Image (cartoon, rainbow, N blue to C red):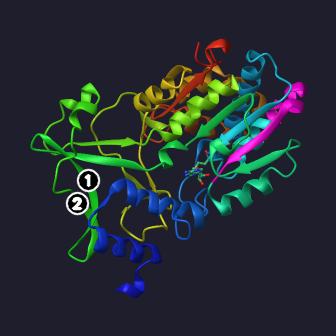
Amino acid sequence: MTDAMSPLEQDIRRRIAAAGPMPIGEYMALCLSHPDHGYYVTQQPLGAAGDFTTAPEVSQIFGELIGLWTVAIWQQMGSPENVRLIELGPGRGTLMNDALRAAHVAPAFRSAVVAHLVEISRPLRLQQEETLKDAGVPVFWHHALDDVPAGPSIVIANEFFDALPIHQAVNVGHEWRMRTVDVIDGRLGFGVAQTAIPHFAGTLPPAVRQAGDGEIFEWRDDTMAFELGRRVMSGGGAALVIDYGHEQSQPGDTFQAVGRHTYADPFESPGSIDLTAHVDFEALTHAVETMGPKAFGPVMQARLLDSLGVQARANALKANVPRNKAFEIDSALARLTGTGRTGMGQLFKAVAFAHPNIGTPPGFE
Ligand code: SAH
């Protein structure tokens, strides 16, 4: 059996044998970003041949509208002559490329902008270099947001926060215990810690305090949200975060594995499938606001794209292409803004964080 196991599974089993059941957050962090075997370190997750697709990969319109959003924010900042356009987790670089192309409408912005990509994946970084080689603005890469030089900044993050590890606790007869990963009957599976998390109930949001027996609460470390909040304040700009998730903190288990565009077993071949969980927008907003920015939203992705002019942009593109291409544009639009089961319009939400001096970001009026 050991032969068939991925190197990461062997490592995880060694850790469990030595230190006992592992909190979900540690399992997720190892699976995604183990320096040698992590999913984001070794795999090409995006695109038809990958595991999942994202809004910028569905249509160029998505990145273009975000590009125009960043131009408007820059103007609201007083058009500083140097601005850092920072993207967290840029995937294949598609969003940034479309955004910078759309920004040709504002040559002064294009001359002011330097792109900073925060990325941990080596294969994706190479892909981003390829995508952006003719972008016409300087591009730099970093491992962490804090490594981006200080100064006026605009930050964008699409499907980034869902990829950060979550922790889970289970309500067991009036106490909360960590949910763990353990070896059960020779296989990796979910377990529950033997003892309660001390003083946990007092830290819970009100809607979660009512949770019943067996219910699960999940949360993320606030570190990234704090960094984002600090950056918005010190850089005098704004951030746009788009992701799938829920508006209010609530009990529930959203931990999921996605492989080849379908749901997978989170314990099957650790390191070779994507693990994610919904973003808790209430928790994210609360953490960012602690650092001083003003929060706007969340609004549904459909509403944001509508108010940024998605329909007009689609019509303009359709005017110049043959009918079968026009059909593709319509179906991409339906995917981005649709509120049904296959649409991203309702499940995905957008929240903006802005320095109090710059006013309301476009799309959040
Ligand atoms: N924004 C892109 C890709 C989303 S996938 C799109 O919309 O298509 C998540 C991205 O975040 C990938 O680029 C992944 O490599 C990156 N990522 C995941 N965890 C990260 C971390 N801790 N720090 C920096 N980048 C990370």
Disc 1 residue: CB within 8 Å of ligand 1: no
Q: Nearer the viewer, residue 302 or 183?
A: 183
Residue 288 located within the stretch drawn in magenta: no
Instruction: Report if the CB atoms under discs 2 and 1 are less than 8 Å apart.
Output: yes
Assign a secondary structure to mark 1.
strand
Q: CA distance from mark 2 to mark 1?
A: 6 Å
The x and y percentages for residue 119 are 65, 52
Residue 132 vs residue 357: left or right? right
Q: Quadrant of residue 329?
A: top right
Q: Nearer the viewer, residue 97 or 326?
A: 97
Residue at 53 percent across and 59 percent down: it is 51
Residue at 16 percent across and 46 percent down: it is 214
Three-letter code, disc 1 = Arg
Q: Give the total of numbered labels.
A: 2
The x and y percentages for residue 203 are 28, 32
Q: Nearer the viewer, residue 293 or 56?
A: 293
**Residue bearing the label numbered 1:** 179
Disc 1 residue crowd, few under 14, some 14–19, many 20+, Cα 10 Å: many
Q: Quadrant of residue 308?
A: top right
**Residue bearing the label numbered 2:** 191
Three-letter code, disc 2 = Gly
- Residue range in magenta is 101-119
Residue at 48 percent across and 45 percent down: it is 162
Asked whether residue 50 appears in the rendered view, the answer is no
